[in-house]
Image (cartoon, rainbow, N blue to C red):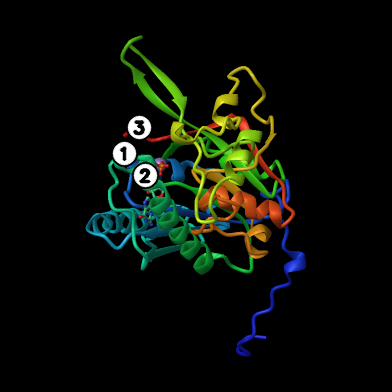
Amino acid sequence: VPGDHISHYDLNKLTFSSNALEKKEKVLILTPMAQFHQEYWDNLLKLTYPRTLIELGFIVPKTTDGDETLKQLEQAVKDVQSPKKKVPKFSKVTILRQDSEAVESQEEKDRHAFSAQKKRRSQMATARNSLLFTTLGPFTSWVLWLDADIVETAPTLIQDMTKHDKAVLAANCWQRYYDEEKKEDSRRPYDYNNWVESDEGLRLASQLDDDKIIVEGYSDMATFRPLMAHFYDPNGDQSVEMKLDGVGGTCLMVKSEVHRDGAMFPNFPFYHLIETEGFAKMAKRLGYEVYGLPNYLVYHLNE
Ligand code: GDP
Ligand code: MN
C-alpha cells in the first residue's frame, strides 16, 4: 500500500538462476576505483545485459588522486544517465567516497611488493566491504565484482557467467602486452589469486602465527598451488569449470545470497587468508562451492 512506509520483499521469490536474463534478475556491478580508465568504462557500456537490470556501485579513495578519479567517473556517469541523452540508463548508480585508509602508492611496483601486501590487501578488503554493505539491495540477484582496470571482456559477460549457476565464479584474468623479443602482440596470465589449495599451502598455513597471512603469487612464499591462470587452453571449451579454493576480485560473479548469508572480505587473517582469498574461504565455510572458468578470459589493463 503506498504511503504506509513498509516495504515487503520476499527473499524466497528472489532467484539467481542459469536463466538470469529471461527471469530479469538484477545484477549489481561493484568496482573499487582508485583510477578511472576510459577503456574500463567503454567495455562496461558494451555489455549487452539490459541496463534496466543493472545497478552500478563504485568506491573511490579519499585521496588527491581520488579527487581526479571522482571527477572523471562523475562525468562518465552523467554522459550516460543524463535525461537528455537518448541512451539506455543503468537502473541506479552509487558512488561512495571511502572513509577508510586508502592504498598509498598506485605504482605497479609498489603495489605488488610482497612487503606491502598485508596492509594493501586489508585496506582493499575494507573498501570492498563498505561498497558491498551500502549497495546490496533486497532485489539484487547477482553481484559482479569488476576491477576498474578490466578493460576487455565479452559483451555477453553477465549472461556467460550467470549461465553457470554457480555461487561464486571467477573468470580467468589475463593481460595483453607487446612481446619485445618476438616483436609481436602477446598475452600473459595476470590474476594469480584464483587457485586450488595444495598440501604445501596447508603445511605453510599450519606453521604460521595467528596474525600471519599467505598471499598467492609470490616466490617469497611458495605454495605450489595450482593457479587457474595457468590452466588456460586456447583450444578448450570456454565453459569448462574448475573448482577453486581462493579467488581474486578482478572479475568475479557471486550469487547475492552468498553475501547476504554473511560472506565478506576479511581484512584480518581468516585461515591465514585475507580479502578476496579470504572471501572464497568464508563462502566455502558457509557451505557454498567456488568455481573458476580457466578458458574464459577477461583482460587487465597493461600499465
Ligand atoms: P592489482 O591489479 O592486483 O594490482 O590490484 P589493483 O591495484 O588494480 O586494485 C584492485 C582494484 O581496486 C582496482 O579496481 C583499483 O582501482 C582499486 N583500488 C586500488 N586501491 C584502492 C583504494 O585504496 N581504494 C579504493 N576504493 N579502490 C582501490
Ligand atoms: Mn588491477
Callout 2 environment at 10 Å: few (<14), some (14 to 19), or many (20+)?
Answer: few
Mark 1 Cβ and ligand 1 under 8 Å apart: yes
Instruction: State whether residue 70 appears in this view.
Output: yes
From the viewer's perspective, tell me whether residue 25 is left or right of residue 270.
right
| Residue 22 in the image, given as x and y percentages of width and height | 70, 50
- All told, the count of numbered labels is 3
Provide the residue designation for mark 1: 108
Provide the residue designation for mark 2: 115
Camera-near label (1 vs 3) is 1
Give whichever of discs 3 and 2 has the lower sequence position: 2
Residue 49 numbered mark, or none: none
Q: In the image, what residue occupies the spot 62% across and 59% down? A: 263
Provide the residue designation for mark 3: 302
> Eyeballing the image, is 171 above or below 49?
above
Give whichever of discs 1 and 2 has the lower sequence position: 1
Camera-near label (3 vs 2) is 2
Using the numbered discs, state the Cα–Cα distance from disc 1 to disc 2 in whole angstroms: 14 Å
Using the numbered discs, state the Cα–Cα distance from disc 1 to disc 3 in whole angstroms: 10 Å
Give whichever of discs 1 and 3 has the lower sequence position: 1
| Residue 279 in the image, given as x and y percentages of width and height | 58, 53
> Eyeballing the image, is 100 above or below 142?
below
Callout 1 environment at 10 Å: few (<14), some (14 to 19), or many (20+)?
Answer: few
Instruction: State whether residue 57 appears in this view.
Output: no
The furthest residue to the top: 182
Callout 3 environment at 10 Å: few (<14), some (14 to 19), or many (20+)?
Answer: few
Q: In front here: 49 or 239?
A: 239
Q: In the image, what residue occupies the spot 53% across and 49% down? A: 276
Could you tell me the amino acid type at mark 1?
Glu
